[in-house]
Image (cartoon, helix red, strand yellow):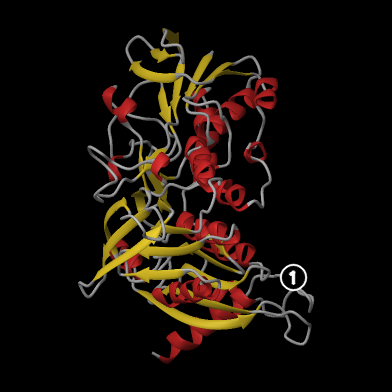
Amino acid sequence: MHLVMIGGSDAGISAALRARELDPATDVTVVLEDAYPNFSICGIPYYVSGEVPHWRNLAHRTVADLEAAGMRLRLDTTARRIDVPGRKLLVTSADGSEELLGYDKLIVGTGAVPVRPPIRGLAGPGALGPTDGVHLLHSMGDTFAVMATLEQAALASAVIVGAGYIGLEMADALTVRGLRVTQMEQLPEVLPTVDPELGALVHAELAAHGVEGLTGTTVQAISKAPPGQAGRLEVQATAADGSAVTRAADMVLVVVGVRPETTLAADAGAALGVKGAITVDPGMRTSMPDVFAAGDCVVTHHRLLGVTYLPLGTTAHKQGRVAGENALGGNRQFAGSLGTQVVKVFDQAAARTGLRDHEAQPAGFDPVTVGSQADDHKAYYPGSHRITMRVTGDRATGRLLGLQLFGHKNAEIAKRIDIAATAIFHGMTVDAVSDLDLSYTPPLGSPWEAVQMGAQAWLRATQRR
């Protein structure tokens, strides 16, 4: 069996590892465009901030580790064309030479690429780029370019376009490095993946650390600043009321999301689905024989929504493992995502899992969302923090549909959102969450866990209606 993976990030490496686990005799080749296999893209902001001291620390496994696991790594090699009938992959090496790699099974893990919004100065003739201090951020190459800009003398300010997860983490990172940061978000509130009530709390945390958050603000143009202006770049935007907004900066970071990278698979005849992602079944099989796909380039099977597109590192790892097993003849299925996410913003953290009202209604639910607060542990023990919650359940059945949390970074926000993710995964009702046998000691929790108190607040509110 000769198994070829295209892409050396989460999905591709997970697939390769699983295949080698199941059959150490499998011949596994991993083809990737750069020289950085199995690097944590999610860790980039913490390298930028200096909390991770060296970029090599971002590697989940070293090249030597991967080779010791039985993989043949083709670094700095670009996949050009998939010959599905002939089961061959045309690749180009760094020196420009071409080669045909034969395969028995192929796994496509080409990932995603940053969205490049229609901002003047960002695309087209004369577009500004990393050497001008204008950056996208998704790869290790992007990271090195950002660091090169940051290492220039007298860098004092930055504008970040976008206030999603990466945008917020980079606002934190650049502030830690001593830059004055302005964050521009087109939508009405930062972190638009949570309800505005929690987004406003994140916004307040940004402001408390000196970040200027401009929401409802659409960036129109990025240009070189006029002589004599503080900052070498100028960002022109329009506020929600139509007024003009202009900020000067030494660097600009554009992080407004990603789109699936599917050109290679589409050219080979792969069916595409939501957001142009590769269509796969729960076994990660594409529409092409002997070709699987996984990670940010494929559609996501969601446990509550059906088929959608939701690129997450955790999902990519799981999908890759399924693809690697099934490529060897298995019949494992990806169990589905709930979009469980968490982000640290300075001293606070925000998290979500499942659905919000506007997502649940089109899926056929009758959602009710109730906000509440609870302490992370008994208030009489020093160091307790309040957690703000928003519980979403179905009015008719009482089924738990979603949870959103905001609280101090030491309040175990990530683990508490995992309680709800587990409950939703298994179809539990909001009421049943109160029956879970969860741990308690005053320094770490309460007899009623905070998430259980949020569930009880939802029940009280809905029973009154």
Q: Is residue 194 above or below residue 462?
A: above
Seen from the viewer's position, the closer of residues 66 and 254 is: 254
Residue 258 screen position, x and y as percent = 37, 46
Q: Is residue 337 above or below residue 230?
A: above
Asked whether the viewer can see residue 414, the reply is yes
Question: Does 73 sit left or right of 129 as displayed?
Answer: right
Q: How many marks are shown on the rendered structure?
A: 1
Please state, as top left, top right, bottom left or bottom right, where the N terminus lies in the image: top right
Mark 1 neighbour class, 10 Å CA radius: few under 14, some 14 to 19, many 20 or more: few
Residue at the spot of label 1: 439
Place residue 463 in its image quadrant: bottom left
Q: Which residue sits furthest front?
A: 228
Residue 31 screen position, x and y as percent = 49, 21
Question: Does 41 sit left or right of 78 as displayed?
Answer: right
Asked whether the viewer can see residue 434, the reply is no
Please state, as top left, top right, bottom left or bottom right, where the C terminus lies in the image: bottom left
Question: Does 145 sit left or right of 255 as displayed?
Answer: right
Residue drawn at x 66%, y 67% is 412
Residue 320 screen position, x and y as percent = 51, 35
Residue drawn at x 59%, y 25% is 19
For badge 1, the amino acid type reads Ser
Q: Which residue sits furthest left?
A: 242
Residue drawn at x 36%, y 18% is 80
Residue 364 screen position, x and y as percent = 30, 65
Place residue 396 in its image quadrant: bottom left
Residue drawn at x 45%, y 45% is 137
Q: Secondary structure at mark 1?
A: loop
Seen from the viewer's position, the closer of residues 221 and 2 is: 221
Seen from the viewer's position, the closer of residues 281 and 295 is: 295
Question: Does 447 sit left or right of 363 as displayed?
Answer: right
Q: Which residue sits furthest bottom?
A: 464
